[in-house]
C-alpha cells in the first residue's frame, strides 16, 4: 500500500515562495505510468488540481497556476516537491499530494494546512 505524507511550513508570508514536500513510501515514484500530483482546497471551496510529475520526470501544470508553480522530485529520497511563488492570502488552503495510475486516483496524503499571512 502506497502512503504519502506532506511536509512543510504551515505559515508563509505574502510574496514569498511556498515549498512543500511529499514523501512516498510503499512504492517508487519512478514506477511506470504513475503520476504524482499536488492538489489544494481553499477554505469553503472545492479541490483544485495544481500539477503533477510523472514517472519519467515530466511535469504538467494547471494553466491557471503554471506561471507560479514548479514540481520537482528527488528519486534518491522518493520525494516530490511543490514550489508556488509570489503567494497571496488566496493561496491559503489545505494542500494534498496524491498518486494517479491508469487515469484513476490512488493514495492521498492526509493534507497539510498552509496559511498565507503577514
Image: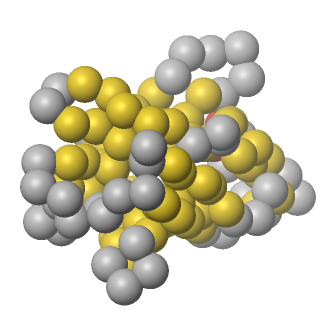
Report the residue that reaches farthest toward the bottom: 76
**Quadrant location of residue 44?**
top right
State whether residue 6 appears in this view: yes
Q: How is the structure coloured here?
A: secondary structure
Residue depicted at x 32% and y 78%: 75
| Viewer can see residue 66 | no
**Most distant residue in the right direction:** 118
* Left or right: 55 as drawn, with respect to 109: left
Choose top left, top right, bottom left or bottom right for residue 77.
bottom left
Q: In this view, does 43 lie to the left or right of 82?
A: right
Vertical placement of residue 63 versus 81, above or below: above
| Residue under the point 51% across and 22% down | 47
Q: Where is residue 56 in the image (x, y as percent from the top left)?
A: 12, 65
Q: Using the image, determine if residue 31 lies above or below residue 93.
A: below
Determine which quarter of the picture holds residue 102: top left
Please name the residue shown 25% across and 25% down the image.
104
Q: Nearer the viewer, residue 81 or 33?
A: 33
In the picture, measured across the screen, residue 30 lies left or right of residue 67, that is left
**Residue 85 location in percent, x, y?**
52, 63
Image quarter of the C terminus:
bottom right
Q: In this view, does 92 lie above or below 3?
A: above
Place of residue 11 in the rendered image (x, y in percent of width and height, measured from the top left): 82, 58
Exactly how many numbered labels are in the figure?
A: 0
* Residue nearest the viewer, comparing 85 with 23: 23
The image shows residue 114, relative to residue 11, as above or below, that is above
- Give the quarter of the figure containing the N terminus: top left
- Give me the residue at 21% from left, 65% from top: 30
Residue 5 in the image: state x and y as whole percent: 60, 54
Frontmost residue, 8 versus 99: 99
Left/right placement of residue 105 relative to residue 41 reads left
Amino acid at each position: 500500500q502506497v502512503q504519502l505524507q506532506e511536509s512543510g511550513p504551515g505559515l508563509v508570508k505574502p510574496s514569498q515562495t511556498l515549498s512543500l514536500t511529499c514523501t512516498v513510501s510503499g512504492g517508487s515514484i519512478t514506477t511506470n505510468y504513475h503520476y504524482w500530483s499536488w492538489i489544494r482546497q481553499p477554505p469553503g471551496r472545492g479541490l483544485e488540481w495544481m500539477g503533477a510529475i510523472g514517472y519519467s520526470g515530466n511535469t504538467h501544470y494547471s494553466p491557471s497556476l503554471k506561471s507560479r508553480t514548479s514540481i520537482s522530485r528527488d528519486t534518491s529520497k522518493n520525494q516530490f516537491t511543490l514550489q508556488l511563488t509570489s503567494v497571496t492570502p488566496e493561496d491559503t488552503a489545505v494542500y494534498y499530494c496524491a498518486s494517479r495510475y491508469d487515469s484513476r486516483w490512488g493514495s492521498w496524503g492526509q493534507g497539510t494546512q498552509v496559511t498565507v499571512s503577514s
